[in-house]
């Protein structure tokens, strides 16, 4: 857990500022020279903290610097941190923890969003809408806003980033962990300049899902560039264009290597800790040389973790 809230807020803000340029990646998978895995690790700590109880989160930050809420009927908790000295505010959104959240995950009908005009995953957009209505009056005008989250929380954080971006709020950056897809190709292209960076640990199954809307059969894809966290110091990097090409490949092509345990927040934290003393980029086609299979992670995971929805803590 974070031991110095103010220092952590400053460091995550500095990290997220660097993400602004990521939407314009080069044709080759050449990672930006300013990647800072220590700061990404601190972002992961904050995403993990969003899973804690409201009382525990409030107690870990100074009075007046934090707001925690679970608005609407979606039971998606978010944390809002203020850094008044630097006029910055950070939003962290919790991932799946119960049946209510699970229903949001499974509601993959495509809806035309009234704010952005793009197609969105209905379940994720419902959660984002509930949080946005509660959050917007609490944002401090003139502050730069940053967002993060894991799993469902990552998708909601990205959609919130789109809403704030369209409302002319200064969005400094968005970083997500194990984020599922939430829009189609047209939506991704419409927000190609959104400052978002996704972290995907090894063969995290959730990052490949959902594949398409439940009725109109439109393909879901990701927005933004991606860092694929591998074992030890190794990682692979993909631009938004490369991520789109990857998303449009048949899901069945990856069934032999998907891993639900790779979605756990503890492995994201470990994957980033392993790179704090130095990170080494590898080609995507060489990534399998640096994959470590975790318990229940060998081959295809066929048993859904019923009654163990909290992907931050489930064993």
Image (cartoon, grey):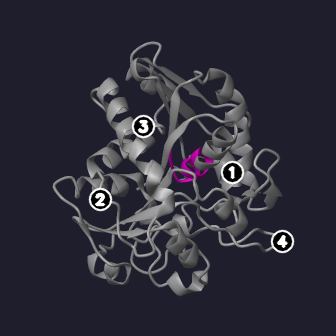
Residue segment shown in magenta: 148-157
Tag 2 and tag 3, C-beta contact below 8 Å: no
Q: CA distance from mark 2 to mark 4?
A: 41 Å
Numbered tag placed on residue 49 in the rendering:
3
**Front label number (2 vs 3):** 2
Q: Residue at x 64, y 56 (%)?
A: 191
The residue that mark 4 highlights is 216
Earlier along the polypeptide chain: callout 2 or callout 3? 2
The residue that mark 2 highlights is 33
Instruction: Determine whether the residue tagged by mark 1 lies in a helix, strand or loop.
Output: helix
Q: CA distance from mark 3 to mark 1?
A: 20 Å
Q: Can you see residue 91? A: no
The relative height of residue 310 versus residue 54 in the rendered view (above or below) is: below
Instruction: Determine whether the residue tagged by mark 3 lies in a helix, strand or loop.
Output: helix
Q: Which corner quadrant of the image does residue 213 belong to?
A: bottom right
Tag 4 and tag 1, C-beta contact below 8 Å: no
Residue placed most toward the observer, 260 or 119: 119
- The secondary structure making up most of the magenta span is helix
Which residue extends farthest top? Answer: 63
Mark 3: few/some/many CA within 10 Å (<14, 14-19, 20+): many
């Amino acid at each position: 857990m974070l031991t110095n809230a103010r220092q952590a807020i400053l460091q995550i803000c500095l990290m997220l500022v660097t993400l602004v340029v990521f939407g314009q990646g080069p044709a080759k998978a050449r990672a930006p020279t300013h990647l800072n895995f220590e700061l990404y690790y601190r972002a992961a700590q904050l995403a993990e903290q969003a899973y804690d109880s409201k009382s525990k989160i409030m107690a870990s930050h100074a009075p007046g610097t934090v707001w925690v809420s679970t608005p609407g009927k979606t039971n998606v908790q978010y944390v809002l941190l203020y850094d008044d000295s630097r006029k910055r505010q950070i939003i962290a959104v919790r991932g799946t923890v119960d049946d209510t959240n699970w229903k949001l995950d499974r509601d993959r009908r495509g809806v035309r969003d009234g704010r952005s005009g793009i197609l969105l995953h209905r379940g994720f957009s419902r959660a984002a809408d509930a949080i946005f209505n509660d959050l917007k009056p609490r944002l401090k005008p003139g502050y730069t806003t940053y967002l993060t989250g894991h799993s469902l929380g990552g998708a909601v954080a990205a959609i919130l980033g789109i809403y704030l971006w369209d409302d002319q709020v200064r969005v400094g950056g968005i970083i997500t962990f194990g984020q599922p897809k939430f829009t189609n190709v047209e939506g991704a292209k419409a927000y190609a300049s959104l400052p978002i960076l996704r972290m995907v640990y090894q063969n995290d199954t959730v990052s490949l899902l959902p594949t398409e809307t439940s009725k109109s059969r439109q393909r879901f894809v990701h927005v933004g560039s991606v860092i694929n966290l591998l074992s030890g110091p190794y990682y692979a990097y993909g631009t938004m264009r490369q991520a789109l090409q990857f998303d449009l490949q048949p899901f069945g092509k990856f069934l032999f290597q998907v891993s639900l345990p790779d979605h756990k927040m503890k492995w994201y934290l470990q994957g980033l800790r392993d790179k704090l003393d130095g990170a080494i980029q590898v080609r995507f086609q060489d990534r399998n040389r640096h994959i470590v299979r975790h318990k229940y992670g060998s081959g295809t995971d066929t048993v859904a973790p019923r009654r163990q929805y909290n992907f931050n803590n489930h064993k």
